[in-house]
Amino acid sequence: MWGIELDRSLDISLKRQIYQRLRDQMINGILKEGSPLPSTRELAQSLAVSRNTVNEAYDMLIAEGYAESRQGAPTRVVGGLILDQAKQSAFQQHQEAIPVPSFRADFKTGQPDLREFPRYAWQRVFQKALGEMPVELLGYGGPQGLVQLREEIAAWLLRSKGLTVDAGDIYITAGATQALHLVADLLHTDHPEILAEDPCNIEMIQTFIQKGYKVTPVPVDAHGIETNALSLDHRGPIYVTPSHQFPLGGILPAARRAELIRFARRCGSYVIEDDYDSEYRYYGEPAAPMYAMARDRVIYIGTFSKVLFPALRIGYVLVPRELQSRWRRLRTYTDVQNPPFEQAALAEFLRTRKFDRHIARMKKLYRERRQVLLDALADCFGEQWRPWGDAAGLHLAVEFAGMAFDDSFRDHARRSGIRTVPVEHHCIRKGRHTDKLLLGYGHLEPGEIRYSVQYLQQFAAEYFKEHARHR
């Protein structure tokens, strides 16, 4: 009766099921404006529930304005409830039709091997941190982040990169992406402009584009941003990845770092240093941050997503002191703070050196996988390729002689089960790096790397043969 069916196996209470069924009939126009609802006694008998259950469902409808009740009269449906049925956009229909891709050769960049994360050790420190957390930390802790975590990050930067930092200059964020959003707001002007390496991480630079910034590209060579291409006609902040340029992999020489800082000072602007994975340098120590050269002009962004796991949304920023009060205000009115539990667990992970041991173990593993990738490329492509950049990170930029990679290549590769990104995808000005592909390897085991490179070589040979035939 009344088109109501109750499911007693659900966790939803019977009164809420009755409320939902009647509400949906009102919104869909099945129950018209002014229509009387059955008496509570009648509906209770037909549904085999208590009358009190129906009373409570009716009370919910009345409280939310779906129905009205007057003394001595039946409860009736109010007007203005009917909604037009939402039509699916063509984009939504298309998205639903696309299955989640499964790749036979997945060269995704920036992906650590999550199978190697020490989950048991993390679980132990998480439980310890939660058990020992003072009750006051369950409230609002402020926009800067947990003191213990900031102190441990400062200690880690000192022992890993020789960087002496005051914990008071460290600001915890929900990863590097949020950090860039805050920086974009922090440095926003009436006519915002940002100078960016070209190529750069095109997804990260979208943060500034969405904030209304004009992007001015500055070319990159094998060593990083070409500082001789900077012009005082452009006076915005400069976004760089000097410790491991993304995507080409170079380490920015000291003289160019100094020139960047001089340029920022002349312009009254800032260098935004994105240090996304410099912990993974396989020969020698990690490159020292630019921040050490000019704490007043460099905004340093660090993250734990590449060295631990991406779902851990914790990053940090070293903020110049003249910007810190504005930063705190921006963060307060964005989302106030990161959850304290993950911060406390990460602080303990750092304090007990479990983090250090994990980094050391993964550096060895990734160094071996990088060598497997180089050997597989030599076996499959002979001398028709060369690597770019330093021996670092979780991906390799590879130049292939006589080949040109564009969106068509990428799309055909995906349809054949290969995920790889041409460097051109990350270029602002197109045409300088058409012969280069990005091959992520951190998440692949040696056998997967060898198979994937062999499969890529077979696909590329067939693709370019067919491409030449149709010219």
Image: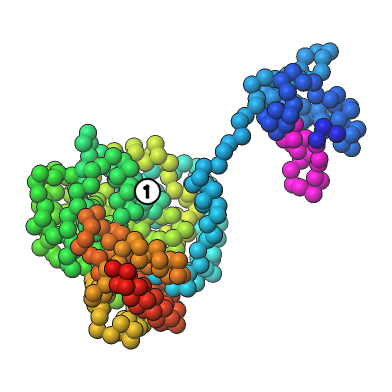
Q: Which residues are magenta?
A: 4-23
Nearer to me, 110 or 36: 36
Say if residue 171 shows up in the picture: no
State the residue in front, 250 or 218: 218
Rendered view: 373 above or below 133: below
**Residue 202 spot, x, y in % from top left:** 31, 55
Q: Secondary structure at mark 1?
A: helix
For image coordinates 71% across by 20% down, the residue present is: 33
Q: Quarter of the image holding residue 214?
A: top left
Location of the N terminus (image quadrant) = top right
Task: Say few, some or many: other residues with alpha carbon within 10 Å of mark 1 (under 14 / 14 to 19 / 20 or more).
Answer: some
Hey, what amino acid is under mark 1? Gln
Q: Quadrant of the C terminus?
A: bottom left
Q: Front-most of 465 and 398? A: 465
Q: Residue 226: which quarter of the image?
A: bottom left
Which residue is label 1 attached to?
Answer: 178
Depth order, front residue of 364/339: 364
The answer to whether residue 321 is above or below residue 367 is above
What residue appears at the point 73 percent right and 23 percent down from the top-left corner? 32
The reply to whether the magenta stretch includes residue 15 is: yes
Q: Residue at x 35, y 62 (%)?
A: 408
Q: x, y (%) of residue 328?
A: 33, 40
Residue 16's place in the image compared with 124, above or below, is above
Task: Identify which residue is drawn at 86% across, 30% down.
Answer: 43
Residue 462 in sight in this render: yes
Q: Is residue 131 left or right of residue 304?
A: right
Whole-percent x, y for residue 358 in the image: 41, 72
Instruction: Please give the count of numbered marks on the rendered protein.
Output: 1
Q: Is residue 186 magenta?
A: no
